[in-house]
Amino acid sequence: MTEELSTLAAALHAAKHFEQAALATLRALLGMAEQELEASSFAGRGGLLRGVVHLRPADAYSRLVALEREAMERLPPGEGSLPLAEGPQTALLASASAWRAVVEHGCAVSIDVGLGTLQPHQEPSRRLVTSLPATAFTSESQQRLLSRQATHVCVLPLRMPGGRIDGMIALEASCMAALGQEFIWRRIGPRMQLAVDLAAPYLMGLPPRPGTMPETDEYLPVVGASMANLMAVLRVFAWQEETLLISGPTGAGKSRLARWCHERSPRKQHRFESLDLMTIPEELQMAELFGWRKGAFTGAVKDNPGCLARAEGGTLFIDEIDKLSLKAQAGLLHVLEERAYRTLGDAGSEQRANVRFIIGTNANLPESVRRGTFREDLYYRINVLPVRLPPLDARRDEIGPWARYMLARHHREKRPEGVARLAPEAERWLEQGSWPGNLRQLDNLIRRAYTLAMVEQGSATSELELRESHIRQALAYEAGTQGSPLVEALCQAARAFVLEAQRREAPLDIDLAESLRGFVLAEAVRQVGREEAFRLVGRESLVKSRNHQKALKQEVKKAEALCQEVGQPVPLVLAQAGGGEPL
């Protein structure tokens, strides 16, 4: 035991990337389990199949790595890891209920796939054996595990210091002889949990292995390095049949991501249907989902197939799921559990729902459950493959490329001929801005700026350049909804300070941020003169005491120090303000 942990600790200490740490951990766990299996009464009658590391901090997937037992010998120690490959047979989750049990009990759980039972690893006096509820462990999930020859699964929590659980590791084994019997998991569980506890800080703290940039296409034309990990997970999730839950702020691109997943799924030859609940009154939600027959209600003058029927064989994306009424939530839960529904006004038999569901939301669904506005059983039924789409402000490497793409697309819509370019200074200005409205706000701004550029340069020109002045002017129209221009400018200054600090090898002392006072005073002096400048910023007492000249020089000196530190020439406005001559 000590030797196993020492070997794992050495491998983790040498790991430079998450994938290396994940591989070392899976090797150790599979090795421990194999030794225990060979020493058990099931020796020679079963074997280990695979292990999967699932990182899902704050209950949203961020990374996945799998190791097939048969591939262990082909991978030299310390040489990377195997990311989950695309395909329907990919080793994925044991089940959503396994994750829920791991979080609720804070310990490992065992699953007997054949019997459909889940057993938390607790003291015998507290041991529970429960049938997995249909809302969490469906017959489809059970058959999918059995189709991969998995009969027994052990799920171990990735526990961080302080008790927070940020992921899990699932081990799958095949042993038909052990169906309905106690397998090796409980005996080996404490040893494996020690290994997982040792590995957890490395798995959560190490950066991903640098790799090639994700591919782009017409459905997702921009993917930055900031999205690489998420896209690797979504490439796997796109192939699965389980419900995918995409959370993220409004306008961040959830519907685009849902369509991208559909186009990379086995259902891509069939329809992608989208239902935005923000646009559907509560009283019509059931009708839009399930369809209706003529005369089913007032206004139903003809048959309507509904979203489920239109998406037959394909994907149904339901956005803003938190806006679904409690009555419609009950209907959707029935569809997810039974894969069947009845059209409104149809007294016949139920129809089969052969669709893959992708759900979108910008709400905190657990909080909605606590408030009683969202059904708990429906939440657990859709929270199977959860991912979180970051806001655009957290994907700054994508802002410029998205702006160029939006400009080119808008120009093609208006004038197929000619070229529209985004000036470099305009792109830099956009990258330093704040985008609370995410891609939707950026797209609206580009369209507005494009119109302004067309007015200025003339609609007959074959080439158009979108400059910083156009962007600033377009943003000015949003001033009423964006809040104080001063606050926005200060936010931009703060982002520029942080970006400069990240660019440098040495730290950038935060005390240099005080140089803002010098820049403000210098600008005020340029516009209204020295004495009036101090009155303008609330320092009239310095003028009365004749100390304002000294104060100005001190503040300008701080601003000049910042310029020197970042290797930039002193702006003329500073040089003039600090020169001692009246302006």
Image (cartoon, grey):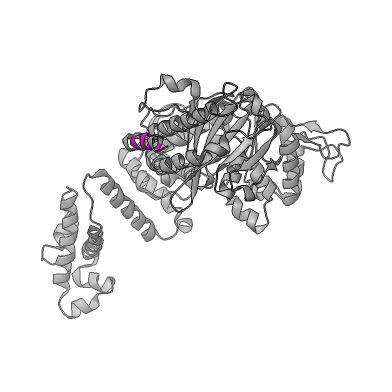
Q: Nearer the viewer, residue 171 or 207?
A: 171
Q: Is residue 54 above or below residue 514?
A: above
Magenta stretch holds residue 423 = no
In this picture, which residue range is highlighted in magenta?
5-10
Q: Is residue 407 visible?
A: no
Q: Is residue 7 magenta?
A: yes
Which residue is pictured at 48% across the width and 32% down the height? 32
**Main secondary-structure element of the magenta-colored stretch:** helix
Q: Nearer the viewer, residue 497 or 61?
A: 61
- Residue 216: x percent and y percent? 45, 28
362 and 209: which one is in front? Answer: 209
Q: Quadrant of the N terminus?
A: top left
Please determine whether, in this image, residue 553 is positioned above or below residue 564: below
Return the x and y of residue 157 as percentages of the image width and height. Answer: 51, 43
- Inspect this view and state whether residue 42 appears: yes
Q: Residue at x 22, y 58 (%)?
A: 512
Tell me residue 172's x, y (percent). 56, 30
Residue 247: % across, % down = 55, 44
